[in-house]
Amino acid sequence: MKGIHDSCLEYGLKPDGKVDYVKGACLSHRNILLNVAMTALMHQRSERDTVVTALPCPHVYGNVLMSGAIQNGMTLVLHPAFEEKAIMQSIQDHRATLFEGVPTIYMFMLNHPELDNYDLPSPRCCTVGGQTMPVPKMEEVEQRFGCPLIELWGMTEIGGLGTTFAANGPIKHGSIGVALPYTEARIAAAEDADKTLPVGEVGELMIKGGIVMLGYYGNEQATREAIESDDWLHTGDVASMDEDGCVFIVDRKKDMILTAGFNVSPAEIDGVVAGHPDVALVAVGSIPDEVKGELAKAYIVPRIGATPQADDIISYCREHLAACKVPRAAQLVDDLPKTSTGKVMRRELKTLD
């Protein structure tokens, strides 16, 4: 079973692809308006900005972007679909001050052979969300675009963002930022949601504040499971927090790979493989193993003109990862399975085998 977020709905699928459940997140006007206002405050969005994006407006990321443009008088250049050359031309022609997208959008642009032919105006900042982005790729974006890349995190149940960095403040790559104003974030123990873990320890990210949904429509049981009696929302993300309140996502609970009793994070392996010079895009999934239960496998879209070898990728990982985290296989692919927003669907990676 897997959960898929689409606008204000979450639905689960059975192995045969049929719908198993539907959960509709009930969001108030206050939820949305507060989220949009605090996002604008953190990113200094104003009528002086022109933002280019191909994020679909029904999705929570695209919706908060569109609503923010309307609320703050920004110019919104909205593309119906992502196509590298069209987006780069649009950033150039409209002299964009903001560009926003998911990690795969940036990675495809970095891999495009004509990127350097465009006179990109060095936006004042770019944002990335939807999934964690490998730090090496974030650094490459900043170098090629000439501006800060700010990571953000959000979910349907809060109507937009929950954490990000201030555009005029310090940024820590690899972190999704700090809680929005009027919002709280903490790391809870997996076995006891009432217990807040100390700095650096890994548990479940929980969110509280005026952005949290009212509940799931017509589903009191799901609402009780998601929102504690003291109004803290379960996010389902495994994370840690540092002494500055910056949150570091480890992975989704459901995406963790269980190898010989060890919980292995696909996102951590993504970050290492992405640092290989021949890799344009990578996603790590699990493959069954009779002895260890599950093993990691890397699916790689190579850079244009490169033909990385599986053995080289695995050897590279051995230099940067503990033995239990090293992928046991690597496969070159033309593309990765993605949602309409460009988010990689890890559980669909097996269809590429």
Image (tube, rainbow, N blue to C red):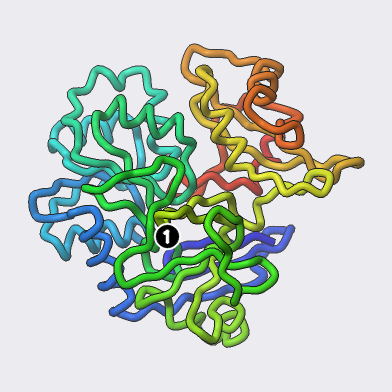
Q: How many marks?
A: 1
- Relative to residue 205, is residue 27 drawn left or right? left
Location of the C terminus by quadrant is top right
Height in image: 40 above or below 227? above
Coordinates of residue 163 in the picture (x, y in percent) = 38, 59
- Relative to residue 91, is residue 195 drawn left or right? right
Q: Nearer the viewer, residue 332 or 178?
A: 178
Label 1 packing within 10 angstroms: few (<14), some (14-19), many (20+): some
Q: Amino acid at mark 1?
A: Gly
Kindly indicate the quadrant of the structure image that contains residue 110: top left
Kindly indicate the quadrant of the structure image that contains residue 86: top left
Height in image: 147 above or below 153? above
Residue shown at the point (37%, 45%) measured from the top left = 128
Kindly indicate the quadrant of the structure image that contains residue 295: top right
Coordinates of residue 168 in the picture (x, y in percent) = 21, 48
Coordinates of residue 171 in the picture (x, y in percent) = 33, 44
Disc 1 on helix, strand or loop? strand
Q: Which residue is mark 1?
A: 154
Residue shown at the point (55%, 53%) measured from the top left = 200
Height in image: 273 above or below 76? above
Residue shown at the point (16%, 30%) measured from the top left = 121
Residue shown at the point (47%, 53%) measured from the top left = 242
Coordinates of residue 290 in the picture (x, y in percent) = 91, 41
- Relative to residue 319, is residue 304 drawn left or right? left
Q: Nearer the viewer, residue 270 or 249?
A: 249
Q: Residue furthest left?
A: 48
Location of the N terminus by quadrant is bottom right
